[in-house]
Amino acid sequence: MAKVKQKHPNESFEQLLRRFKKAVDNADVVKDSRKNEYFEKHTSRRKRAKAAAVKREEKRKLKDSLPPKQLR
């Protein structure tokens, strides 16, 4: 679970809430809870994992095909 503490006594509640939301996003709390919300068959889990792998591979190929950035 994500935890945040006040950095200084004058920190507003809105700033503290914003930092908490970032911490929750970084910890993937919502993603894990949605994943465990319902039972997923092994075949659909494998299918989703394979689709993610294909997407990563396409992204890597696109990155490799672009010319490198030149230094100024």
Image (cartoon, rainbow, N blue to C red):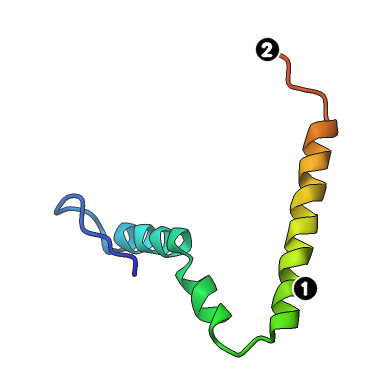
Residue at image coords 78%, 56%? 55
Residue 36 image position (x, y, % from top left): 53, 83
Q: What residue would you read off at disc 2?
A: 71
Q: Nearer the viewer, mark 2 or mark 1?
A: 1
Horizontal relation, residue 9 to residue 51: left or right: left
Residue 31 image position (x, y, % from top left): 54, 72
Q: Is residue 36 shown above or below 23? A: below
Horizontal relation, residue 19 to residue 12: left or right: right
Q: Residues within 10 Å of mark 1 (few under 14, many from 20)?
A: few
Horizontal relation, residue 4 to residue 68: left or right: left
Residue 33 image position (x, y, % from top left): 50, 79
Q: Amino acid at mark 1?
A: Lys
Q: Secondary structure at mark 2?
A: loop
- Image quarter for residue 20? bottom left
- Image quarter for residue 42? bottom right
Residue at image coords 73%, 61%? 52
Residue 14 image position (x, y, % from top left): 33, 62
Q: What residue would you read off at disc 1?
A: 47
Kindly check if marks 2 and 1 are in contact, taking CB atoms under 8 A apart as contact. no
- Whole-angstrom CA distance, mark 2 to mark 1, is 41 Å
Q: Is residue 57 shown above or below 68? A: below
Residue at image coords 17%, 50%? 8
State the quadrant of the N terminus: bottom left
Q: Residues within 10 Å of mark 2 (few under 14, many from 20)?
A: few
Residue, far top: 72
Horizontal relation, residue 7 to residue 20: left or right: left
